[in-house]
Image (cartoon, rainbow, N blue to C red):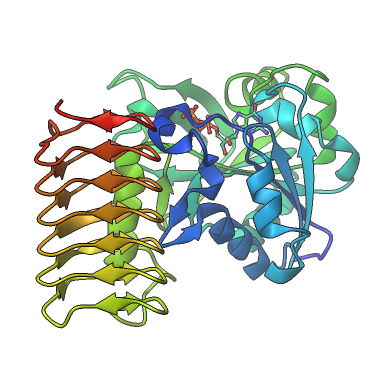
Amino acid sequence: MKDKVKAVILVGGHGTRLRRLTYNTPKPMVPVLNMPFLEYVIRNLRGHNILDIILAQYYLAESMENYFGDGSKFGVKLRYVMEGSPRGTAGAVKNVEKYLDDTFLVLNGDIFHNCDFTNMVKFHHRHRAKATIALTPVEDPTIYGVVETDRRGKVKHFFEKPEPGEVSTNMINAGTYVLEPEVLQWIPPDTKYSFERELFPQMLTDDKPVYTYSFHNYWMDMGTAEKYLQLHRDLLSDKCDNHSLEKDVIIGDKCNIHSSAQFSGSVIIGDNCTFGRGVRLAGPVVIGPNCAIMEDAVIADSVVWDNVTMNTRAVIKSSVVANNCILGSDSYLVDAVLGDHVTVDEGCKLKPGARILPGGTVKDT
Ligand code: GTP
């Protein structure tokens, strides 16, 4: 890989589908196995020697800069570029045009995958493409942008969220592109503009060479709470190549765990957590730092963020609990998502599938 291939990561979206979790935390900073999601994307790029990275920002930008700084701690050089108003996926790249003078990559900042960027760039050059779109197979393509190609991988048609039976392929736009700088002249300045719905279809109409690069490794768009949880299940069950854990139970520093606590399956615990008598964790479970899990509380198949208190006999199953929540004694959550700073009253049993906005107290749903 040539050193000068740069990458633009799109990190400015509101993350509305993950709304309960993204009020205070932008989607790229949402923790995955207790590490900001964006760090995986940056590590992946660094693994392919793509070290010059531009973050195209809009929503809740500061936390990224506070965490990653100039990128040197992560072995890369980071530049942050803020939009005055959200420009959409292609408009956001137009907004960073002055940094792009050679072939470059664009990545959605909410997709976990192991695409081989090195090979993808080589493919792009071999085909003399102006744009190359990574494609990945999914079981149900009807909720995605589907791309039909000829045998050489040249795009024939785009279908946005097609009806069942409308398409003959399950290969979807994986949210990763290799582009030539020339493409930027076809994006209007200071305008909201999309790759998927506007630029790529227009390039096809204008007979520009748009190619696709198919990969079959793990791919997950973690844009909804269900998929966010599924990503954790997959990572903790070794379904994602390259991401195996060295042991089943990983415990952070300065944790205080009662000898009767039982952990089964894959469990990751952050620093400074306490676990009382009889606590049960049935993995996959990830618990952030500074959590207090009191006597006989149970957590199964769930992700709990930072500074959460679970009082005695509280139960969390197949749920996501954001920062600073308090669960009362005997409270019960299944398939739930709690935003930050939610208090669930003692004995309260949330209806399965509850989605609770940040703040406030939940008595009964
Ligand atoms: P939803 O609102 O739930 O669809 O999420 P989102 O806002 O992240 O939108 P979407 O999933 O379509 O975005 C794909 C990627 O592009 C994500 O990484 C977003 O952060 C990013 N993105 C979307 N819109 C913009 C934008 O206007 N500006 C910038 N800089 N990034 C954007």
Front-most of residues 242 and 140: 242
Image quadrant in which the N terminus is located:
bottom right
**Point 38% across, 32% down: residue:** 359
Towards the viewer: 3 or 92: 92
Q: Residue 247's quadrant in the figure?
A: bottom left
Give residue 168's position: percent from left, percent from top: 35, 29
User: Residue at (75%, 45%) from the top-left corner?
Assistant: 128
Q: Is residue 193 left or right of residue 261?
A: right
Residue drawn where x is 40% and y is 40% of the image: 340
How far from the left and from the top, in percent, is residue 214? 50, 49
Q: Is residue 283 depicted above or below 98 in this figure?
A: below
Residue 133 visible within the image: yes
Q: Quadrant of ligand 1?
A: top right
Q: Position of residue 162 (x, y in %)?
A: 38, 20
Total marks in image: 0
Q: Nearer the viewer, residue 164 or 339?
A: 339
Say if 7 sits above or below 153 in the image. below
Which x, y percent locates residue 330?
9, 48
Which residue is at a point 89% across and 45% down the rendered structure image?
A: 101
Q: Is 130 rendered above or below residue 43? A: above
**Residue 119, visible in the rendered structure:** no
**Residue 144, above or below 103:** above
Q: Is residue 151 left or right of residue 45?
A: left
Instruction: Work out which quarter of the rendered image holds the C terminus and state it.
Output: top left
